[in-house]
Amino acid sequence: MPGTRSAALPATGPGHVYVVDDDAPVRRALTRLLRAATLEVEAFASAEGFLAGLADDPGPACLVVDLNMPGLTGLQLQDEMHRRGLDMPVVFISGKADVSSSVRAMKGGAIDFIEKPFSDDQFLGVVAQALERDNRNRELRDERKLLEARCARLTPREREVFALVVTGLGNKQVGWQLGATEKTIKVHRARVMEKMEARSLAELVRMSDALAAPGTAEAAASASDRGRA
């Protein structure tokens, strides 16, 4: 459970924190601390209870989970979240930590692994990092969805021009690659800029980088194919 209490709690910003710990006093202490930091809190005595009680998206959120619990352990819960596609930052707490568990948790994407007892400042600081990461990830996902929708407007030839233009090739070079005239490529390029709502080549390159994330380009191409069907 938390250790030293500071005179002033660190600012955490808005967010929703799920606490999963089979120790009732720890759950109560963490719940009080998080609510004092103006955060929304839901506490569960087991990983199974958390999974069953997880409802609608609450907005920026993170999970604080004990490493060792009856039933599903913290590490097993982390694995199950990955399996279900639940992309939520995880903070592990434990009174009996070991190096291998810490390494496995961090490789699984955990924000931090902190040992009990810990100070209020330390705990809230880590929670703030987790919420900040979730908020940033949400913004990136929203941006990717927007870019996917724009990319879905492109014709197959425009997607080819898009892919070559962002590598730095000029219109004449792109034309050589695609067997088209420079004038034709210029028209396609203008349409790409218009449909992607890019104000400059640099912005178009940044969009291409965002779309290159795993699964994004395929989703955009699929959406485009559906739009032409």
Image (tube, grey):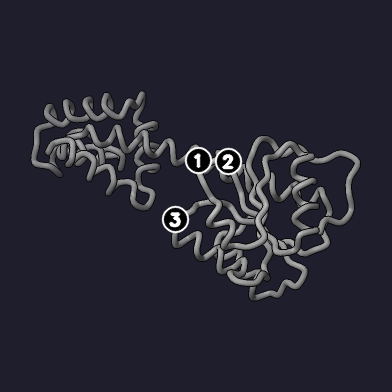
Q: For mark 1, what is the residue?
A: 138
Camera-nearest residue between 211 and 35: 35
Tell me the quarter of the image containing the C terminus. Answer: top left
Q: For mark 3, what is the residue?
A: 85
Residue 158 seen in the figure? yes
Q: Earlier in the sequence, mark 1 or mark 2?
A: 2
The alpha-carbon separation of the residues under discs 3 and 2 comes to 16 Å
The crowd level at tag 2 (other Cα within 10 Å; few <14, some 14-19, many 20+) is many
- Indicate the position of residue 144 as horizontal and vertical percent values: 39, 39
Camera-nearest residue between 134 and 202: 134
Classify 207 as above or below 27. above
Q: Is residue 116 left or right of residue 195?
A: right
Q: Amino acid at mark 1?
A: Arg
- Indicate the position of residue 36 as horizontal and vertical percent values: 79, 39
The label on residue 60 is 2
Classify 21 as above or below 124. below
Q: Nearer the viewer, mark 1 or mark 3?
A: 3
Whether residues under marks 3 and 2 lie with C-beta atoms below 8 angstroms apart, the answer is: no
